[in-house]
Image (tube, grey):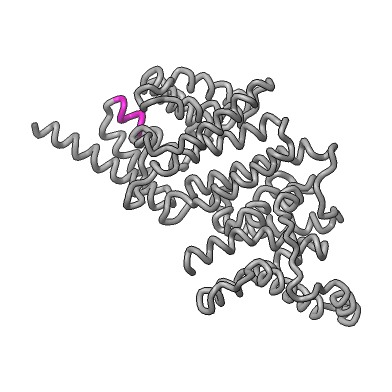
Amino acid sequence: MPPRVEDLLRELSPQVLGALTRRYGDFDAAEDAVQEALLAAALRWPRDGVPDEPRGWLLQTATNRLIDRWRSEQARRERERLAQQREAPAGEVSDQDDTLILLFMCSHPALTPASAIPLTLRAVGGLKTAEIASAFLVSEATMAQRISRAKQRIAASGAPFAMPTPDEQPERVRTVLRVLYLIFNEGYAQSSGDELQRVELSDEAIRLARLAHRMVPDDGEVAGLLALMLLIDGRRSSRTGGAGQLIPLSEQDRTLWDRTQIAEGLALLDAAIARGGAGEYRIQAAIAAVHDRAVSADDTDWPQILALYGLLEQLTGNPVVTLNRAVAAGMAEGPEAGLALLATVDERLAGHYRLDAVRAHLLELAGDVDGAVAHYRAAAERTTNLAEREYLALRAARLRSQSGAAAGG
């Protein structure tokens, strides 16, 4: 499928699903109908061309699929009567974008975060079930069942397709932020595939974060997450080379960074911090800001980053945060300090490629070439992203080559 068509379908998918759910009130059936419409478009549009009103085409096709399903079920006559009542005139398409309402519906209190996040990644973020399963380290079949059960719970709750009430909003916002964070991360460094980044996912996460920020402008964590996304995404153009190869932060050409976007992120962060409090997204944004404010990699304030990761670790208890703190410790206090921290998460992150990648980096700093090469290779074997795999394998090869040349000299 041409990238243009794929990008358009991903953009329109949550809009059509939101419109269909609003019209008929059956999220589960609407989601299935939209998936069928997307499949039909993926088959027809590359051959026949994109229609003049692609959103209207998808909505009408999904509506037809939904009505066909109702007509084929039991109590045929009754369902046909209801279908005729509900059926909208051809070409009648609302311009309202219900994506944000859909986002909150997927974070309904009837769902646990473990169910709400995958459902939203599929319904709003457009990720495939296999991609979501990879992010959660479970099988595709397990994730498909989890998403199906989540849709059933929403249907059973009888929840209206509407924004949450003021009392419901704080908890729902927390789940929404987690979902947007995961969507952005998948776009920033996708879990599998040939390309390092999926720009359309990062852009969609930023768009939805802007919507959430406009809705709750005084929420420091919403502002913090949007700031974090902007500060990281501002480096996008320097993260890959001409052949799509990964370029680490320490080697990036900082003149390519989007300084307008970074300035917006810094302003958001400063305003969020001024409100008081320290949430996980504000702390992560503060870490990104330290990197973005540094004129060069050598000017990075690693002690400050180390302190911020320490605060974040206390707040979240997340082993991945400890992994990142180990990197900061290695840069601020020496590789031995980083390796000591890394040992504390060996069991919790066993088998994760990033554990090997960080250990390789710290061993390289410590001068242990053999150990670094072994762990770079192990990390390359475990990652499912081709760009990361090539970078890690090349790192190991160059280190081995440099070591051999030094020994020969």
**Boundaries of the magenta span:** 361-366
In x, y percent, where is residue 178?
A: 65, 41
- Residue 75 appears left or right of 339: right
Residue found at x 79% / y 55% = 153
Residue found at x 60% / y 37% = 226
Residue found at x 36% / y 51% = 244
Q: Is 104 placed above or below 362 here? A: below
**Which image quarter: residue 409?**
top left
**Which residue is most to the left?**
409
Q: Nearer the viewer, residue 192 or 140?
A: 192
Secondary structure that dominates the magenta span: helix
364 part of magenta stretch: yes
In x, y percent, where is residue 136?
A: 58, 48
Q: In the rendered image, is residue 342 in sight?
A: no
- Residue 115 appears left or right of 255: right
Residue found at x 49% / y 69% = 1
In x, y percent, where is residue 100?
A: 72, 49
Q: Nearer the viewer, residue 207 or 244?
A: 207
